[in-house]
Amino acid sequence: MIININKEKNYTSRDICNIIGKKLKTRKVGHTGTLDPLATGVLIICTDESTKLVDLLTSKDKEYLTTLKLGIETDTLDITGNIINENNYIPSQEEVINALNSFLGNSTQIPPLYSAIKVNGKKLYEYARKNEIVNIPTRDITVYNIKLLSYDYPYITFTIHVSKGTYIRSIIRDLGYKLNTYATMTELTRTKQGKFTLENSNSLKEFLNDNYQTISLTDVLDYPIINLTEEEYRLVKNGNYIFLNTQEKYVTLKYKNQVIAIYYRKKDLYYPYKMLQII
């Protein structure tokens, strides 16, 4: 099963997975992109066989609505942390717009120290909690769009559309630096992941009351659909490569109206990428 949950504040992404796993009586539950306890919004959850698709969904770009407070920086880069820097400079709205626009395109980013990225087998927040020094690896990111919604000092609210792996807390930290001050995130809502939006999400209460909508595999997979013959299905069922009359890099394979697998093209043949279900 795949479900779009509107995560509420004060839950971790793992909390949501545990609640769903308990309700469905399954241990195979995964999410497709961490939201901090402070954050809300779209959290795509996969269970059972659908957990094989977690990495595919995690790779999708994301959109956020966020608010920050100027003049302070915290150790966690959000309002829940301890203040480590302060500044009373008040930038103009023109400065704010120019600074926001400077993020557009490709760049590298230093993730927050309080994050789950692993370095030498340990998560960064584990180093932070022990006050241990660690070199934080940079990552390549893309900002596709960014738009100022409001500026009422010390608060700025904007929307942003980014590639996978982009930390909005780091964007906000760096925005503060560009404005010759400091900035800390106060609110964050993920409004979209891939093609799944906040508008078509389910609340946790709706899920627990069995009043929710799931996402079909064909809605999740953006690859062209190939309907298999019986002979082709026998080959796929055993994990064999097959010849298909198409040039697509990835294809979704269906048999008797059920999604069976995702295959990828290598030279003139197609090989298993994700085996999903066998009839």
Image: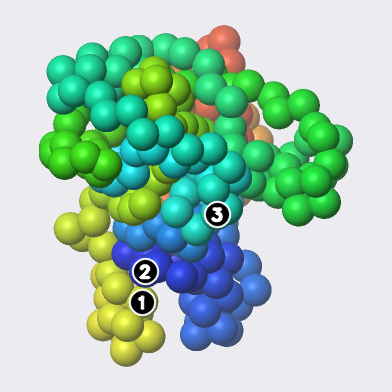
What residue appears at the point 16 percent right and 25 percent down from the top-left corner? 93
What residue appears at the point 16 percent right and 37 percent down from the top-left corner? 151
**Is 164 in front, or is 145?**
145
What residue appears at the point 31 percent right and 13 percent down from the top-left corner? 102
x, y (%) of residue 38? 43, 60
**Is 235 in front, or is 27?**
27
- Tally the numbered discs: 3
x, y (%) of residue 223? 36, 33
Q: Amino acid at mark 2?
A: Glu
Relative placement, left or right, of 172 versus 109 is left
Q: Residues within 10 Å of mark 2 (few under 14, many from 20)?
A: many
Q: Amino acid at mark 3?
A: Gly
Lower position in the chain sequence, tag 3 or tag 2: 2
Which quadrant would residue 252 be assigned to in this image?
top left
Q: Is residue 269 visible?
A: no
Residue at mark 3: 81
Colour convention of the picture? rainbow
Question: In the rendered structure, are the residues bearing label 1 and label 2 in contact, judged by CB atoms less than 8 Å apart?
Answer: yes
Q: For the residue labelled by badge 1, is the local secondary structure a helix, a strand or a loop?
A: helix
Residue 8 is tagged as: 2
Q: Residues within 10 Å of mark 1 (few under 14, many from 20)?
A: some
Judged by depth in the image, the label closer to the viewer, 3 or 2, is: 3
Question: In the rendered structure, are the residues bearing label 1 and label 3 in contact, judged by CB atoms less than 8 Å apart?
Answer: no
x, y (%) of residue 269? 56, 19
Q: For the residue labelled by badge 3, is the local secondary structure a helix, a strand or a loop?
A: loop
Q: Is residue 240 visible?
A: yes
Question: In the rendered structure, are the residues bearing label 3 and label 2 in contact, judged by CB atoms less than 8 Å apart?
Answer: no
